[in-house]
Image (cartoon, rainbow, N blue to C red):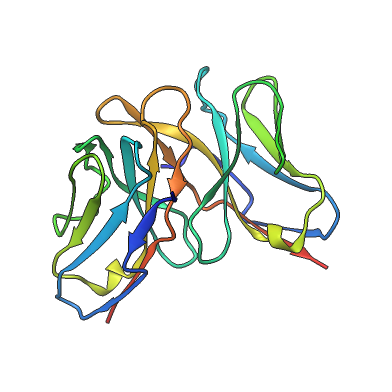
Amino acid sequence: GAGVSQSPSNKVTEKGKDVELRCDPISGHTALYWYRQRLGQGLEFLIYFQGNSAPDKSGLPSDRFSAERTGESVSTLTIQRTQQEDSAVYLCASSLGASGLYNEQFFGPGTRLTVL
Amino acid sequence: DAKTTQPPSMDCAEGRAANLPCNHSTISGNEYVYWYRQIHSQGPQYIIHGLKNNETNEMASLIITEDRKSSTLILPHATLRDTAVYYCIVRVPRGGGSYIPTFGRGTSLIVHP
C-alpha cells in the first residue's frame, strides 16, 4: 500500500561509472517528479512526468542525466559518467496529477548517491 | 527559482507555539500556498495548504494575510519531534501546462527542551 518507494537507498560509485535510480510511485498517481538535494540545500527540481511523458526536461543539470517512465508507473533516473558533484540525495515524489489547483505530493525516502 | 522567502533558521521551546513566516509576494490569485516539512534523512512530508482563508488541521494552522503576500505556519504546541526543515511552497509553471512545486531552502526549526 504503500507510499512511494525508491531503490537503492544508498549507492556508492566511482567517478565515471553510470548509475540507475529507481522510483515506484503510488498506484494511480499519474504525475511523478524527481528532485535532487545536496547536503544542507533545498530541493532542486530535475524533471517531472505526466503519464509516461516528460513535458519539461529543463531542470536536468546536463546531458549525462536522463529519465524515463513506463506503464505510467516505475521511473528510472540514469546518470552517465558520474562526477563527484552528482553526490546528493535524489528524491522522487508522485501526485494524482500535475495540473489543476491542488495536488499533494508524496515523497519517497530518497536514494543517497555518493560518487568517489 | 523558488518564489518564496523564509528565514533560514528559528528555534522554539518545547510546548510553546512555533510561528514560521513566509513571504510569497508574487503569488498569483488562484495559486495555493503549501507547507511541507523534512525531518532529517527523510523525504518531505505534506503539512497543510491554503488559498485565502485560514486553515487548520491536526498538524498545524495556516494564517494567510488578506493580500496573500505572506503566510505563517503555526505549530501550536511544538514538540522535539517537530525539529525539521519547513518549506513554504508555491508552484511554478513548467512546460506542458503543469505547475510544479518549487522548494527553496526552507526554515530549519529547532525545538529545544
Decide if residue B19 is on the left or right side of residue B22: right
Instruction: Indicate left or right for B13 with A9 as reference.
Output: right
Q: Residue lying at the far right in this picture: please name it.
A: B15
Q: Residue at x 14, y 65 (%)?
A: A80
> Residue B65: where, in percent of width, then height?
70, 25
Q: x and y percent of residue A26 in the render?
A: 38, 44
Asked if residue B13 is positioned above or below residue B70 in the image, the reply reads: below
Please tell me which residue lies in front, B3 or A46. Answer: A46
Q: Is residue B74 above or below residue A79?
A: above
User: Where is residue A39, by image quadrant?
Assistant: bottom left
User: At 61% from the left edge and 46% from the top edge, which residue is drawn?
Assistant: B6
Residue B21 higher or lower than B81, as above or below: above
Please state, as top left, top right, bottom left or bottom right, where the N terminus of chain B lies in the image.
top left
Left-right relation of B30 to A98: right
Q: Residue at x 54, y 49 (%)?
A: B45
Identify the image quadrant of residue B76.
Answer: top right
Give the residue displayed 51% in from the left and 27% down from the top: B26
Farthest residue, direction front = A1
x, y percentage for residue B50? 61, 28
Q: Residue furthest top?
A: B29
Across the whole image, how many numbered discs are drawn on residues?
0
Q: Nearer the viewer, residue A74 or B33?
A: A74
The percent position of residue A38, horizontal first and vertical second, equals 40, 64
**Image quadrant where one finds the C terminus of chain B:** bottom right
